[in-house]
Amino acid sequence: MMLGYMEDRYPDIEPYEFGLLEVTDGHVLYWETVGDPAGTPAVYLHGGPGSGSTHGARRHFDPGGFRAVLFDQRGCGRSRPLASEPDAELSTNTTAHLVADIERLREHLGIDRWIVVGISWGVTLGLVYAQHHPERVLAMVLGAVTAGTRREIDWITRDMGRVFPREWERFVAAVPANERNKDLCAAYARLLASPDLHTREEAARQWCAWEDTHVSLMPGWTPNPRYEDTAFRMIFARLVTHYWSHGCFLADDQVLNAMDRLSDIPAVLIHGRFDVSGPLDTAWQLHRAWPGSQLVVVDDAGHGGGSFTSELIAALDSFHTLNLPR
């Protein structure tokens, strides 16, 4: 899942450093750093899975206060190889692999501890990373809160049909009739791995049309222009369906059951009141299990939009003014 952003952010700046980092299994990650090399380190985890990091994400960070690290997760963006080919090896693209990649990047950049910032899927990834490496996390800022549960996946792919019945019928009609009452993510994943180009492209188009639908109740929503890009659609749809058909490679409620590992980490959770595709209860449950967290419910936002980005930036700025140790 991806978000629409407001323009009330920091000025757009170019990276002062960037590169390609070889990790495992033949994957190479694109990374970049923006802001002040002596600033408070922070790492940005994009949504999707598969959306890649955008130029706009740089603008969340005060360039005079943060050393912000942004990168494209395995299989997407400027990282290689891409997940768009039907014979792409996806078995080495899992949550555990991404967690290891984050640590490898931290070590490569010589950062001891950093603020972890995640959006949508990036929230789940950030929480799993922090639960594995709490000693490396200064604080967390998490927007459009997710926890990678089967309940959340079923809500988006099946239960949301009660809100958008016409669009959901089109979404399901793209799947073979004998699979429509089964795991829709797995069915789409198989279509997206078809040797037939037309089958793959149609599946990607239908999947992204549904993605655009279930976030459409956010204030100020407009269709996401990135879904008009055939290459982007294929990468995004392949990775989302790959992760969701495997339950995000997590035991169900794994994140919630390990919240005690984050008890000493301060955090701000930001969630839109009108986020129908990701109901508020996930953020609420995590907040209640996390004494050091603050929950900000944005009354004019859905899965983004409204003042969502302003709240995200305010949360980041609040940690910068704490003068956290580095």
Image (cartoon, rainbow, N blue to C red):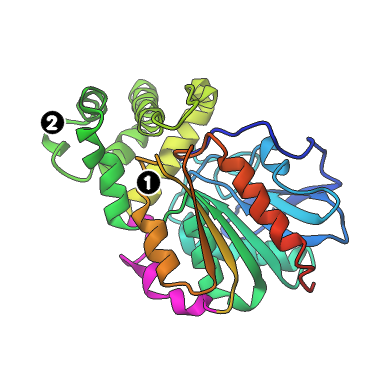
Label 2: element kind: helix
Q: Residue furthest front?
A: 299
What residue lies at 22% left-to-right and 22% top-to-bottom? 166
The one nearer the camera, 319 or 139, is 319
Q: Please give the range of residues in magenta.
A: 247-263
Write down the residue under mark 1.
278
The one nearer the camera, 304 or 242, is 304
Label 1 Cα crowd, 10 Å radius (few <14 / some 14-19 / many 20+):
many
What residue lies at 71% left-to-right and 38% top-to-bottom? 9
The image quadrant of residue 140 is bottom right
- Residue 10, above or below 27: above
The x and y percentages for residue 63 are 82, 48
Write down the residue under mark 2.
177
The one nearer the camera, 259 or 48, is 259
167 to the left or right of 234: left
What residue lies at 69% left-to-right and 49% top-to-bottom? 70
The amino acid pointed to by label 1 is Gly
The one nearer the camera, 180 or 37, is 37
Q: Do the numbered discs 1 and 2 sit on residues whose CB atoms are within 8 Å?
A: no
Q: Quadrant of the N terminus?
A: top left
The secondary structure making up most of the magenta span is helix
